[in-house]
Amino acid sequence: MSGLGGLNKSPNGVVVGLVQLQLPVVNTPTQLAVQTERVVAMVGKARRGYPAMDLVVFPEYSLHGLSMATTDTLMVALDGPEVAAFQVACAANRIWGCFSIMERNPEGNPYNTGLVIDDQGALKLYYRKFHPWVPVEPWEPGNMGIPVIDGPRGVKLALIICHDGMFPEMARECAYQGAELMLRTAGYTAPIRHAWQITNQANAFQNLMATASVCLCGSDGTFDSMGEAMVCNFDGTVIAQGGGRADEIVCAEIRPDLIREAREHWGVENNPYQFLHRGYVAVRGGATDCPYTFMRDMVAGSAKLPWEERVVVKDGTPCGFDPPTRRYRGEQSNLLNQ
């Protein structure tokens, strides 16, 4: 049901293109500007190559590469030239786009931020990565929730970033807010290939939700990113998958109407509904309590693993980062929803 890789679009379809962008090397402001132009050029390539495409998705670290540099001159702001260039590209090509920036944070480490811009050039989704890939990544943990928006052709759209997708609670939160398509952008390298594939499929099936996921691709001379674009249907089957060819755009059609139909009409394995209505055959309406101790403890601020005291790596010192001294300040409002 990929519409021949997005070449054919049904009346109810949404065509998504995943860019296996060549892993860049970005160490200077000049290289950042050049990479911005390259991403913009790929937006044009996506539109020319796939006239029916509704949304083009770029991987995490598309602008910055995998250096993990936090140098202020390389960081990006929402009102900066990089985001403005993306907005112009989306409007000029009449296409929605998903982009990655490392966002300047005057109060601490930068944020790893994802943006979705519509086909008029307006910023519609603004998300800061919840779960940096510790101990490797130095980014500030996200603090503005997981937004779900009305995306192209009315699809309910969410975005998570890389390591976020290893936590089933992230995908469940997207679905709980109504997401029918969850994007997952990443910079993962080859050792994560198996976990990447099974979590993309599980996140889809457990939530009756399509997932569209893409990594950077190729080598920067040090790291090798894997590409591995995947589009998974709401039953967990893979409907499109890329390999390791840099700058390939892997494209597929998803059907939000069939996702809605399954969520409303499935009995067996209607996982999102049944999670909240346990055993509804035996008890009217099902059990709607919270039987999970980890959830109750997190809300109370007392969650602790049985083996927590024996965990060895608890900061970024193995990867050369100084131990942090600041505490997390808690969630803020999303600037797009104020």
Image: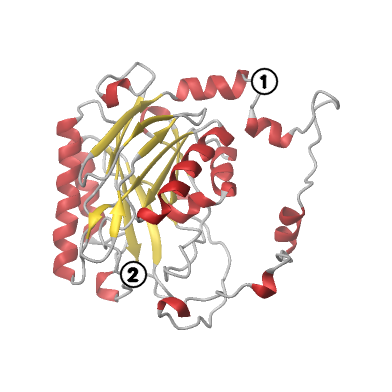
Point out residue 76 in the picture as x, y percentages from the top left corner. Answer: 29, 64
Mark 1: give few (<14), some (14-19) or many (20+) Cα within 10 Å: few
Residue in view at x 21 percent, y 47 percent: 246
Which element is circle 1 on?
loop
Mark on residue 267?
1
Mark 2: give few (<14), some (14-19) or many (20+) Cα within 10 Å: few
**Residue 338 at least partly seen:** no
Residue 185 to residue 202: above or below: below
In terms of depth relative to the viewer, which is nearer, 58 or 315?
315
Point out residue 322 in the picture as x, y percentages from the top left corner. Answer: 45, 83
Check disc 2 and give the amino acid type. Answer: Met
In terms of depth relative to the viewer, which is nearer, 157 or 230?
230
Mark on residue 55?
none
Q: Are marks 1 and 2 in contact (CB under 8 Å)?
A: no
Point out residue 75 in the picture as x, y percentages from the top left corner. Answer: 29, 68
In terms of depth relative to the viewer, which is nearer, 86 or 290?
290
Using the numbered discs, state the Cα–Cα distance from disc 1 to disc 2 in whole angstroms.
Answer: 46 Å
**Residue 166 at least partly seen:** yes
Q: Is residue 13 left or right of residue 65?
A: right
Residue in view at x 49 percent, y 32 percent: 180
Residue in view at x 28 percent, y 21 percent: 4
Mark on residue 68?
2
Quadrant containing the N terminus in the rendered view: top left
Check disc 1 and give the amino acid type. Answer: Gly
Residue 47 to residue 78: above or below: above
Residue in view at x 51 percent, y 33 percent: 209
Point out residue 129 in the picture as x, y percentages from the top left corner. Answer: 45, 58
| Marker count (numbered) | 2
Q: Which residue extends farthest right? A: 283
Query: In which image quadrant can residue 182 be found?
Result: top left
Question: Which label's residue is closer to the chain start, 1 or 2?
Answer: 2
Q: Is residue 135 left or right of residue 39?
A: right
